[in-house]
Amino acid sequence: MHPIEYSLDGFYNRIRAGRLRSADRNPAASRIRSRMGDTILRFLVIFLAGAGAVFILVKGPEASKILAETLNITGNGPMPLWYSATLYFFYALFILGAVFPAFLFIGFMSLAPAPRIRNATFPFITVIIPAFNEEKGISKSLKAAASLDYPAYEVIVVDDGSTDFTMPLIERTPVSCIRLRKNCGKAAALNVGIAQAKGEIIVFSDSDSWLHPQALRYLARRFSDPAIGAVSGKVVVDRPVSLLQRWQMIEYLFGQAVVKVAQVGSGQAVVICPGPIAAYRRDLLMAMNGYKTRTLTEDFDASLDVIRQGYRIAYEPQAVAFTNTPLTWRELFGQRVRWSRGNLQVFREQKKVFFDPASGPVGFFWLPFYYLFIGYGCGLIEILLLGVFPFLAYASGQPLSFFKMALLYFLLVESFSLSLYLVALVRERQLTFSFLLAAVLISPYRLFLSWVKCVALGREIRGKESLWS
């Protein structure tokens, strides 16, 4: 990347200014030095993050022992040998699953490039909205799509065999509609819309979401860079009221304000273009043969296809889509089981991306470490720990001391997780008392998501059928 993209301060800005002056004399050599400098910076971030994590991993038990003795929770009498080994295992898991990636996130976020806009134009855009039994919310979605502030666009709604009043509601709005006789699945519905699209850029949204009036303008301008194949917008939970909705809002903000910015800063691309707001070059979609019907999370699958085609995926936080989220634990369970199963299917279908040099950080860090190891491995271990914890405490011979030490580690983990959520809330200017309280109490929500992933893994192993809804 050209160094003008970076928005760093202080020392690096002075280095950047020197590079820009030399670029006028030898542009080709400047680009080579720039790429080398970017690579060195990212490796430096990884090295520092790893060094910090190793230091904490080595010195942490000693500090924990001193703290335990200070708090008088070590107990009296000898402990079994496996006692310290068990605690150290979970401590190491905490370092690998929370401390190390957090260091990387903060480092990569500091390297995230500023948007690179080159004489932004406004090509004709097609907005495609798939729908299946969405009579409750589709009217709001279509009303917003029909009143977007953009000079030239069309809206295509694909009704995927709805059996409720979705179709009559679509017919009442000034949009094009394609009706499928039977439910074929979201990916197939999207492909039908792609085949009829006239736009140079295709924007996808969901029938339970609605676009901000300026969303298309912010999405379109990012395609002035020919290296960009797709653009991910920002998904915002509409008016969260309940604690469950606020937890989902915090999850969304963290995944965007921290994770996506870190993904861009790592030198590659955003890994997932979300269903509520995602934009693609039409030519690229045609080269990819559209969306694949092989997984339940077609957006994740398509995003990796874009990266495999050699394009980058940009993140545009000013392009906003508002979405409704599940109101009950039962609804959330169904949604997240489908998402989790879909992610597992993507891992299987896109296994060639793992550790592929051409995929860069996506294949070497984000997919194997963050999404698979942290997302699924740590979640499974967390649920397993809850199940065996009473037996471990009893077998230790000093259950009260074991419980106190485990509580100490739990508080460390929660404090560290809370700090990351606070980073997201501050970056998104959402640090209110209600969200702060929700972040402090978010542990049950995280445990629920870990349990959902266990259920999804079991259903995927059994091959249980599941359709989009």
Image (cartoon, rainbow, N blue to C red):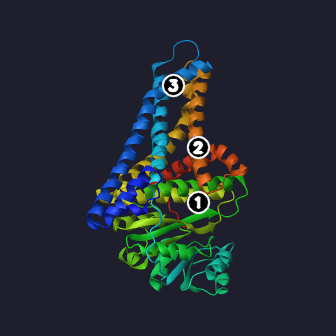
Foreground mark, 1 or 2, reads 2
Disc 2 from disc 3: Cα separation: 20 Å
Q: Are the residues at dot 2 and dot 3 in contact (C-beta closer than 8 Å)?
A: no
Q: Nearer the viewer, residue 160 or 326?
A: 326
Give the x, y percent position of residue 377: 46, 44
Residue tagged by mark 2? 419
Q: Mark 1 belongs to which amino acid?
A: Gln
Q: Is residue 386 above or below residue 362?
A: above
Q: Nearer the viewer, residue 403 or 107?
A: 107
Residue at horizontal 57 percent and vertical 78 percent from the top: 161
Give the x, y percent position of residue 169: 67, 82
Label 2: few (<14), some (14–19) or many (≥20) C-alpha neighbours in 10 Å: some
Left or right: residue 182 compared with residue 243: left
Q: Which mark is residue 335?
A: 1
Left or right: residue 318 compared with residue 359: right
Q: Earlier in the sequence, mark 2 or mark 3?
A: 3
Q: Earlier in the sequence, mark 1 or mark 3?
A: 3
Residue at horizontal 54 percent and vertical 21 percent from the top: 66
Label 3 residue SS: helix
Give the x, y percent position of residue 25: 28, 66
Q: Mark 3 belongs to which amino acid?
A: Ala
Residue tagged by mark 3? 63
Left or right: residue 97 compared with residue 349: right
Q: Quadrant of residue 291?
A: bottom left
Number of marks present in the image shown: 3
Viewer can see residue 68: yes
Q: Mark 2 belongs to which amino acid?
A: Ser
Disc 1 from disc 2: Cα separation: 27 Å
